[in-house]
Amino acid sequence: MEVIDGNRIAADLIAELKAEVARIPGRRPCLALVRVGDDPASVSYVRKKGLTAAEIGIESRNLLPPVSITQAELESLVDGLNADPAVDGILVQSPLPAHLDERAVFARISPEKDVDGFHPVNVGKLAQEDASGFASCTPAGIMELLARSGVDLAGKHMVVIGRSLIVGKPLALLALQKRPGANATVTVCHSRTAGLAALVRTADVVVAAIGRPEFVTADMVKPGAVVIDVGINRVADPAKKSGYRLVGDVAYAAVAPLASRITPVPGGVGPMTVAMLMKNTVKAFHLRKGG
Ligand code: GUN
């Protein structure tokens, strides 16, 4: 069994981006980070995105509107960033507070600045295999992790557990694509899937993105499978100073001995999401500059 080191692979990618950005004359790429409210996980993710941008030489702007912001005010904030020629990428951290319509906000972001890949135009380009669009960062990070770990998906059965807009659906589309590194046969399972355990047992590559701590147990995994754990669940742990520990969607201790390769939590998929956001931001910069 080999543990896939997401921190190392993300660091390689970040070093490549840093070298690329250093060669850009003039203005640096710029990423606007919008966070509404103080959800603790969002605070930590957005901080990490800002720090990684700085490490690469990407400028970042933090916009922290109050939780009382209205839909119209948030959309007009996005309009301002769309119109700002110095901004290349816009990210609105999900989840938004319940009174806001997240899908409408994502759709308001200019597709050319939608480095999260949530705009309908970019989801459509992903489905059409049009590489000029932006793919959602977590699934793109998973594809990169697999490629850089020497896992060729061609002809393999990938079972994705979870059908979210952010992970499950775009990952299924990416893995299905007709290009080197992809060409998988994909099954997407979810909370209403009948016979889920038996389906997962047929997977060569299992991707757990359902948001339930330790959902994937050893009896659900075929020996030799590649296991990718997208879950980041905070579980109460009085022994920890923070009062919690992070647990994935996979029962790691029991599943790891069976797997040929597995991603840990933390240090697996998480760092790749941030690295791919930076990659998308540099791509947005180049596309907007016309090459
Ligand atoms: N929340 C969890 N993952 C993501 C992501 O990739 N982008 C944004 N904007 N919010 C998230």
Image: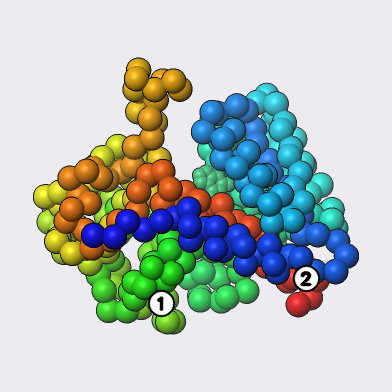
The location of residue 154, given as percent across then percent down, is 32, 79
Report crowding for label 1: few under 14, some 14 to 19, many 20 or more residues within 10 A (C-alpha): many
Q: At 76% from the left edge and 77% from the top edge, which residue is drawn? A: 291
Identify whether 22 is placed above or below 70: below
Q: Nearer the viewer, residue 231 or 161?
A: 231
Pointer 1 residue: 181
Q: Residue furthest top?
A: 238
Q: At 69% from the left edge and 56% from the top edge, which residue is drawn? A: 56
188 displayed left or right of 77: left
Task: Kindly tell me whether residue 115 is visible in this rendering.
Answer: no
Q: Are marks 1 and 2 in contact (CB under 8 Å)?
A: no
Q: Nearer the viewer, residue 176 or 236?
A: 236
Q: At 48% from the left edge and 57% from the top edge, which residue is drawn? A: 8
Q: Earlier in the sequence, mark 1 or mark 2?
A: 2
The location of residue 181, given as percent across then percent down, is 41, 77
Q: Nearer the viewer, residue 178 or 119?
A: 178
Secondary-structure class at tag 2: loop
Q: At 74% from the left edge and 65% from the top edge, which residue is drawn? A: 21
The location of residue 18, given as percent across then percent down, is 68, 62
Label number found at residue 64: none
The location of residue 161, given as percent across then percent down, is 29, 53
Q: CA distance from mark 1 to mark 2?
A: 28 Å
Identify whether 241 is placed above or below 203: above
Task: Kindly tell me whether residue 22 is visible in this rendering.
Answer: yes
Report crowding for label 2: few under 14, some 14 to 19, many 20 or more residues within 10 A (C-alpha): few
Q: Name the amino acid type tagged 2.
A: Arg
Pointer 2 residue: 23
Q: Nearer the viewer, residue 152 or 220?
A: 152
User: Which mark lies nearer to you, 1 or 2?
Assistant: 2
Identify whether 38 is placed above or below 280: above
